[in-house]
Image (spheres, grey):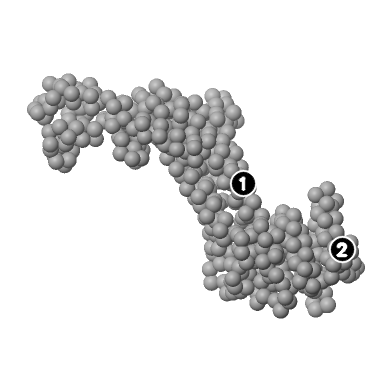
Amino acid sequence: MKKKNKPIWESRIKGNTSNTFQKVSSSIDIDKRLFKEDIAASIAHVEMLNRQKIINFKIKNKIVWGLKKIQNQIIKKKYIFDFKDEDIHMSIEKKLFEIIGDDAGFIHTARSRNDQVLVDLKIWMTNSNDKLIKMLNQTIKSILLIAEKNIYTVMPGFTHLKNAQPISFAHYLLAYVEMFERDKKRFETNLNSLSENPLGSAALSGTSFNIDRNFTTKKLGFKKATGNSIDTVSDRDFVLEFLFTSSVCAMHISRLAEEFIIWNSDAFKLITLNDKVVTGSSIMPQKKNPDTLEYLRGKVGQSYGNLFSMMTILKGLPLSYFKDLQDDKKFVFETFDTIVNSLKVLNEVLKNFSVNKNEMLKLAKKGHIAATDLADYLVKNLNYPFRKSYQITAKIVNYCEKNKKNLSDLSLKELKKIEPSLKDDVIDVFDLNKSINSKRSYGGTSFENIKKMIKKYKNA
Ligand code: ARG
């Protein structure tokens, strides 16, 4: 084997590592994505080593020059990633030897791949978190636009998928704004653990070199250095936080997708997906299938899977670094890519569907949807306890069902047969718009509340 093909540990480990193992355990195809972060962190590291007089100025410059050359080669796709190099860190270090010679050997003073990989990943994840926050902002904006146009769109609110109470379609949409706002907050909170700099923890116990962790912390945009070197190289909580936050976000997307699938179905017809976001069938010429939504509904499975894989890997894992941890990056990258794609697809869907207002209203008129309003009316106007009002209303609904009528079809005479004290203004109760507008409790579906909420989120 030529010298340049030998691993860094060839002076210790004589035979070649099993080829089979090298192939399956190499992570370079995955972590090559961290090359920029790795190089930035290495530059900060050697600058610090030089300031602390651990390496001299000339060597520092040589290393920085070499690293920048490597970065260029990778960007220009003139760089070969060899699985035998195991990971991006070894690959770059080896290349540095090729470019600047033995002075490359100074780069790994006072650090280990154990802290190196973490600093790379944390920088990468900080940027990715920011990207997701921006995308969520975009999603929220798109939803608000639709909400604004549908403040007065009446639809049935469901519980158990049975018509429950009338709501404004905008109120329904604003529920998703709340969910995505929470997702955003979770991603923002996660930035805290990502803001602690692992560099300088070295393999697990810190280092005897007089390093300055505050320098690399500032230089790399972290807020502070991590507090315990053993915990630092063992900790993957920030990975779990990301995977959990992404899973919850993917779950929100999945719920919206499922609901839209139901509403777009021939049975409901509350919305219609435009041709841009449907696919055809290979055999049934008439079909327009909501595959985009099914993609969104299904993808949450991958996020959950990655979250559970990482939790399982960490369970019972002794401190500190173990190879088991290496898969963290695969999970993070995969989950990130999927959530980015999902948010993009979701935005497309949001721009490409129409609201079937008439169908919504038609459905809202079914299922005696104003029954709670009638019960509330009895409490307010006849001073009955709610339970008694509930029973009277149930009797009225039973009467409707028996006579194949809607609540709003009933005459005062019919109503009075069941509850003689009713007055003619009771008829107002069956007006769905009035019902909606009466829900003025904070967070309720009244048109006024909705307008205020839309304004609040638009100015947020
Ligand atoms: N590629 C490794 C990982 O991602 C880097 C750390 C390796 N450290 C080691 N002692 N083998 O986990």
**Does 73 sit above or below residue 312?**
above
Q: Horizontal and vertical percent for residue 374? A: 21, 32
Label 1 SS: helix
Q: Residues within 10 Å of mark 1 (few under 14, many from 20)?
A: some
Label 2 SS: helix
Which of 231 and 16 lies nearest the eye of the viewer? 231
Residue type marked 1: Lys
Mark nearer the viewer, 2 or 1: 2
For label 1, the residue is 131
Residue drawn where x is 82% and y is 56% of the image: 68
Residue type marked 2: Lys
Would residue 91 be visible to someone looking at this image? no
N-term-proximal mark, 2 vs 1: 2
Q: Horizontal and vertical percent for residue 3? A: 89, 69
Residue drawn where x is 83% and y is 51% of the image: 72
Mark-to-mark CA distance, 2 and 1 = 34 Å
Residue drawn where x is 61% and y is 42% of the image: 341
Q: Horizontal and vertical percent for residue 106? A: 82, 71
User: In which quadrant of the rendered view does residue 18 lie?
Assistant: bottom right
- Image position of 316 (left or right of 386): right
User: In which quadrant of the rendered view does residue 222 lie?
Assistant: bottom right
- Image position of 437 (left or right of 308): left
Residue drawn where x is 49% and y is 37% of the image: 459
For label 2, the residue is 62
The residue carrying mark 2 has its beta carbon less than 8 Å from ligand 1: no
Residue 14's disc is: none
**Does 140 sit above or below residue 198?**
above
Which of 372 and 67 lies nearest the eye of the viewer? 67
Q: Horizontal and vertical percent for residue 287? A: 54, 27
The reply to whether dot 2 and dot 1 touch (C-beta < 8 Å) is no
- Image position of 48 (left or right of 165): right
Q: Residues within 10 Å of mark 2 (few under 14, many from 20)?
A: some
